[in-house]
Structure formats: C-alpha cells, structure tokens
Amino acid sequence: MTEPNYAGFWRRVLASLLDNTVWILFLFWIYVWIVEGAFAVGDTAGIVAILAFFSLWFNYFAICEWRWGQTIGKNATGIEVRSIDRAPRLTYGQASIRNLLRLVDFFVIGEVMIATSKRKQRLGDLAAKTVVLRRVPHPVQEQPA
C-alpha cells in the first residue's frame, strides 16, 4: 500500500484562513449586532449570545468534517480529514475531539507538530486518530459525442 499524501503546513494554514475569515466577517458584520442587542437586554443574555457564537463556530468545523470530511476552506484547498484506520468518514466524536483541541493547537503547538511529524498531524489529529490528506483528483471521463 502506498503512503498517503498528507496535507502540508501551508495548505492547511490557507484552509484555516479561508474558514476563519468567513467567521470573522460574520462576527463583525452581523453577529456583533446580535451580541450588542443581547447585552442591551442584560448581561446574561449577552453571555449566552457569545457562547452561542462559539458553539456555532465549533460545530461548523465538527459537523462539516464529520459529514463531508472537509470544511469549505479544506474543500477549496483540496484537502480532507480522514480517520487513520481509513474509515469512509469520521465519527462525530473524532471531529469533536480534533476541533476541541484546535484551541490548544492555535498556540504554536499545532504548527510545530504539523511541520515536524511524519504524518503532519497536530495535537487534535493525534488525539482523534485522524490525518489531513490531499484529495485525490477524480479522472475526468469524456462524454461520447
């Protein structure tokens, strides 16, 4: 069996930038009004609105990777998350573990691990038993005339 084509550091960074840019734009253009309105009602409502945003952010990554193996950013950069055991798709637990540890990996740990590990895994990948692979292009079949 041939060695998988693991996604490199810069491709993964680009995918993350694409995904998080959408979230940052959503946060500053739309969600800030929701949070301001919630805080106008009361501190508890404001905190709930902030927690809802982080829940949406987390679940975007977890659900997309669980359901399709990739987020919009990963799709755009031609990479996907797969289980080490080559299962057809991740479990929700695997997707959740790798995305909970995204917060830890953000503080240099993930970048160093991706750059130095054989399978280019960050801490979240190791804990969830996942890898990020470059997607295999599907051959284009010509249609009969």
Image (cartoon, grey):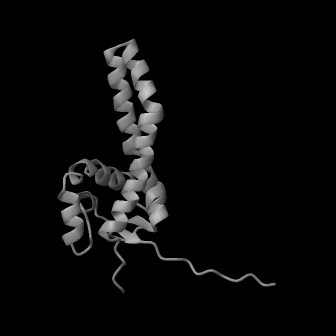
Q: Position of residue 31 (x, y in %)?
A: 44, 31
54, 66: nearer the viewer: 54
Number of numbered discs present? 0
Most distant residue in the right direction: 145
Q: Position of residue 35 (x, y in %)?
A: 40, 25
Residue at 33 percent of width and 67 percent of height = 10
**Above or below 111: residue 107:** above
Q: Position of residue 40 (x, y in %)?
A: 39, 14
Q: Can the viewer see residue 91? A: no
From the image, which quarter does the N terminus lie in? bottom left
* Quarter where residue 37 is shown: top left
**Image check: 82 left or right of 136?**
left
**Image check: 7 left or right of 64?**
left
* Quarter where residue 135 is shown: bottom left
From the image, which quarter does the C terminus lie in? bottom right
Residue at 62 percent of width and 80 percent of height = 140
Residue at 45 percent of width and 53 percent of height = 64
Q: Position of residue 87 (x, y in %)?
A: 40, 67
87, 31: nearer the viewer: 31
* Quarter where residue 132 is shown: bottom left
Q: Can the viewer see residue 42? A: yes
